[in-house]
Image (cartoon, helix red, strand yellow):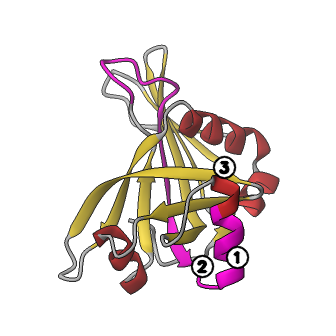
Amino acid sequence: MGDTGTTTTWAAFEAAEPAFAATVRERFGQYTHHSLATVRKDGSPRLSGIEADFRGDELWLGMMPNSRKALDLRRDGRFALLANPGSGTDMGGGDVRISGRAVEITDPGALERYAEAVGMPLPFHVFRVEVTEVVRTVVEGDDLVVRTWSPGRRLRTIRRGTDDSPPREQS
């Protein structure tokens, strides 16, 4: 799940790491449906399908009225959003995950504007994403490469080989 640390907007992430943000956005753009992990009332995880919407400078999550995932996020905004892994063994540009907090939009005017922009009738829930971590895992040659970014930290790249050598961080 998204950690409880510092959050930032999608726009601030894009400004801090434009190339990495473009890669992440492109990866989410390959498919319409993705996987959203939320926290159930009893503290256990819930995994649901969802469409993520990059609109303007923000990342949005829209949901049916009173869906379980929406009720989860209203109670506890922490989430993890995994880009659709595709099919077969082709990772299609890597495994990409965004963690953070979802902030529900409740202003009627803002909801109307969003509904008009996406061409869907209300009612539905809309949440704006506040990012705590972005991770991309991809295979490059014989290495598993993990790139991770969090607000206030630089982009880190860690490589793991197929041998028994320890992971190594790249600058």
Between marks 2 and 1, how big is the CA–CA gap? Answer: 7 Å
- Tell whether 65 sits left or right of 134: left
Instruction: Identify which residue is drawn at 52% across, 26% down.
Output: 93
Instruction: Identify which residue is drawn at 41% across, 52% down.
Output: 50
Q: Quadrant of residue 144?
A: top left
Instruction: Return the disc, 2 or 3, that comes first in the chain's sequence.
Output: 2
Amino acid type for the residue under numbered disc 1: Ala
Q: Position of residue 107 (x, y in %)?
A: 65, 85
For label 1, the residue is 110
Q: Is residue 15 magenta?
A: no
Q: Position of residue 95 (x, y in %)?
A: 44, 36
Q: Position of residue 1 (x, y in %)?
A: 38, 65
- Give the mark toward the camera: 3 or 1: 1
> Which residues, given as a range, are shown in magenta?
86-115
Instruction: Kindly state the secondary structure of the residue where label 1 is placed.
Output: helix
Instruction: Identify which residue is drawn at 30% across, 18% down.
Output: 88
Q: Is residue 154 visible?
A: no
Of residues 106 and 87, the one nearer the viewer is: 106
Amino acid type for the residue under numbered disc 3: Leu
Instruction: Kindly state the secondary structure of the residue where label 2 is placed.
Output: loop
- Give the mark toward the camera: 2 or 1: 1
**Number of the label disc, if any, that sits on residue 155:** 3
- The quarter of the picture where the C terminus appears is top right
Q: Position of residue 83 (x, y in %)?
A: 46, 42
**Number of the label disc, if any, that sits on residue 105:** 2
Q: Do the residues bearing badges 2 and 1 touch, measured as CB atoms within 8 Å?
A: yes
Instruction: Return the disc, 2 or 1, that comes first in the chain's sequence.
Output: 2
- Tell whether 132 sits left or right of 80: right
